[in-house]
């Protein structure tokens, strides 16, 4: 019994350590490899201590219980109780499920090798060896996958790098280091649109040094969310300003272009308003203005669509919730699943299979975004650009879709009309919706290439 208690405490100690070190699970290659190696070692030690096959089950249980208790104070969909919804199942698989591959499976494999107690029958011996061999093979395959680093192909005579600015990851690519610098801030909280920029809008690299920011909490910036998820609109603005200063110093340019999309356009335009001397111009696309007002329009439009289409399940869900704002990310699942359908728009692209993404960034794409959404989105509801950005002292250019969702289009139209700027221009792509850069990339590139460079 003493040996079992010792093995359980060993696993629990590793669970507490992991809960303090990586409360949202291993998010980087280093964290994942460390989790695999340490978990396997704990499994081997537990097996040798107990000399029992029961260690294969009890060791992971001790780890999991200690981990979950240690991170009780951490909030977000990836660590909260699983939800019986489509997004909830996806988060469970890519969150706790992936964590199990990185910790529980190698722990079980280690315990299987460590206990050294032969089974009583030949069938059990063979079955045990096969199971241990499969667990080991999967563990090794996962370790190899997470060890492959992100990379970005070189550009002859140009610049191509994956940079770090504090906790933030930034992809920087351009045909020449002397081109004007363009910093792109993607849409969703915790969002990474590196794949979209590489696959659809790479033509921008002929005209700019394009710096694509992974917003705090997502992609290469996943570790920046932290245990307490202390991300606010002001910290988002501070991140943009920090990356701006890095780019100005890196390329020797006093001012750069700033491009913001959708939810990312709010902290982006706030950065341009607060520090206009850093920017040549602000460019907004799918521009958000007042998320509280926009969400109330979305609520009415999705409800009308659901009623017209006989989607009683959606009507019931929205009726139970009542109009937004809502407190957590799962409350917005109906918008995320049906918003584009309600407006007859194409689903947003999910461009993950690019070398600039690691295995873990692809796997955690949804969980990191939802964790950051949960922390940040309620705070973004207090922003209204009608009040907060009545003017910009730099040129303000906008590329909008003619089929933009009403929830965003109505608020943008009133703000744009009142906005004061020394050079204010609006380019509309009549057939595009919320993502002109992804829906009509060639036209988007040509539009930005034609902007004044003063």
Image (spheres, rainbow, N blue to C red):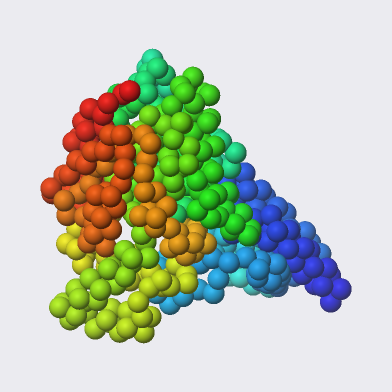
Give the residue displayed 43% in from the left and 72% down from the top: 326
Q: Is residue 32 above or below residue 68?
A: above
For this orientation, the residue located farthest to the top is 157
Q: Residue at x 69, y 71 (%)?
A: 69
Query: Residue at (59%, 57%) from the top-left corner?
Result: 230
**Residue 29's image quarter?**
top right
Q: Residue furthest left?
A: 430
Q: Is residue 6 left or right of residue 147?
A: right
Determine whether 142 is above or below 355 in the image.
below
Quarter of the image with the C terminus in it: top left
The image position of residue 249, as x and y in percent, is 53, 24
Residue 434 visible, this orientation = no
Image location of residue 403, percent across then percent down: 17, 54
Q: Viewer-proximal residue, 281 or 124?
A: 281
The residue furthest right is 2
Quarter of image, res 310: bottom left
Quarter of the figure with the N terminus: bottom right
Q: Is residue 289 visible?
A: yes
Expressed as whole percent of the image width and height from the top left, the position of residue 165 reads: 56, 36
Image-based side of 431 in relation to 321, left or right = left
Q: Nearer the viewer, residue 82 or 240?
A: 240
Count of numbered circles in the view = 0
In the depicted view, which residue is nearer to us: 209 or 157?
209
Apparent side of residue 146 relative to residue 319 in the rendered image (left or right): right
Please state the horizontal and vertical placement of residue 197, each as a whole percent of the image.
Answer: 34, 38
Give the residue drawn at x 37%, y 23%: 180
């Amino acid at each position: 019994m003493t040996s079992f208690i010792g093995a359980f405490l060993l696993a629990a100690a590793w669970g507490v350590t992991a809960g303090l070190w990586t409360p949202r699970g291993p998010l980087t290659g280093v964290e994942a490899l460390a989790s695999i190696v340490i978990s396997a070692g704990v499994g081997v030690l537990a097996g040798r201590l107990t000399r029992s096959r029961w260690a294969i089950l009890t060791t992971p249980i001790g780890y999991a219980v200690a981990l979950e208790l240690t991170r009780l104070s951490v909030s977000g969909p990836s660590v909260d109780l699983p939800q019986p919804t489509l997004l909830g199942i996806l988060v469970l698989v890519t969150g706790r499920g992936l964590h199990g591959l990185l910790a529980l499976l190698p722990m079980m494999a280690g315990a299987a090798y460590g206990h050294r107690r032969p089974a009583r029958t030949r069938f059990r011996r063979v079955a045990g060896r096969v199971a241990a061999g499969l667990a080991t093979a999967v563990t090794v395959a996962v370790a190899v996958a997470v060890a492959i680093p992100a990379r970005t192909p070189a550009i002859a005579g140009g610049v191509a790098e994956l940079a770090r600015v504090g906790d933030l990851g930034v992809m920087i690519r351009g045909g020449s280091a002397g081109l004007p610098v363009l910093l792109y801030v993607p849409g969703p909280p915790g969002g990474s649109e590196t794949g979209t920029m590489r696959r659809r809008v790479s033509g921008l690299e002929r005209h700019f040094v394009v710096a694509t920011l992974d917003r705090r909490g997502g992609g290469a910036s996943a570790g920046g969310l932290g245990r307490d998820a202390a991300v606010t609109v002001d910290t988002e603005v501070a991140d943009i300003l920090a990356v701006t200063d890095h780019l100005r110093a890196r390329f020797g340019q006093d001012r750069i272009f700033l491009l913001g999309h959708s939810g990312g356009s709010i902290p982006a335009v706030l950065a341009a308003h607060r520090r206009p001397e850093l920017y040549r111009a602000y460019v907004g696309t799918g521009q958000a203005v007042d998320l509280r007002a926009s969400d109330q329009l979305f609520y009415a439009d999705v409800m009308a669509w659901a009623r017209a289409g006989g989607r009683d399940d959606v009507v019931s869900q929205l009726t139970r919730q009542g109009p937004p704002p809502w407190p957590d990310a799962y409350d917005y699942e109906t918008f995320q699943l049906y918003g584009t359908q309600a407006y007859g728009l194409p689903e947003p692209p999910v461009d993950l299979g690019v070398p600039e993404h690691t295995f873990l960034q692809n796997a955690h794409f949804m969980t990191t975004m939802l964790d950051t959404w949960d922390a940040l989105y309620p705070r973004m509801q207090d922003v209204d650009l009608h009040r907060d950005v009545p003017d910009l002292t730099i040129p303000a250019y906008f590329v909008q879709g003619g089929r933009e969702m009403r929830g965003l289009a109505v608020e943008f139209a009133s703000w744009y009309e009142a906005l004061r700027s020394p050079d204010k221009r609006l380019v509309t792509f009549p057939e595009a919706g919320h993502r002109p850069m992804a829906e009509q990339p060639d036209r988007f590139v040509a539009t930005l290439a034609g902007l004044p460079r003063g």
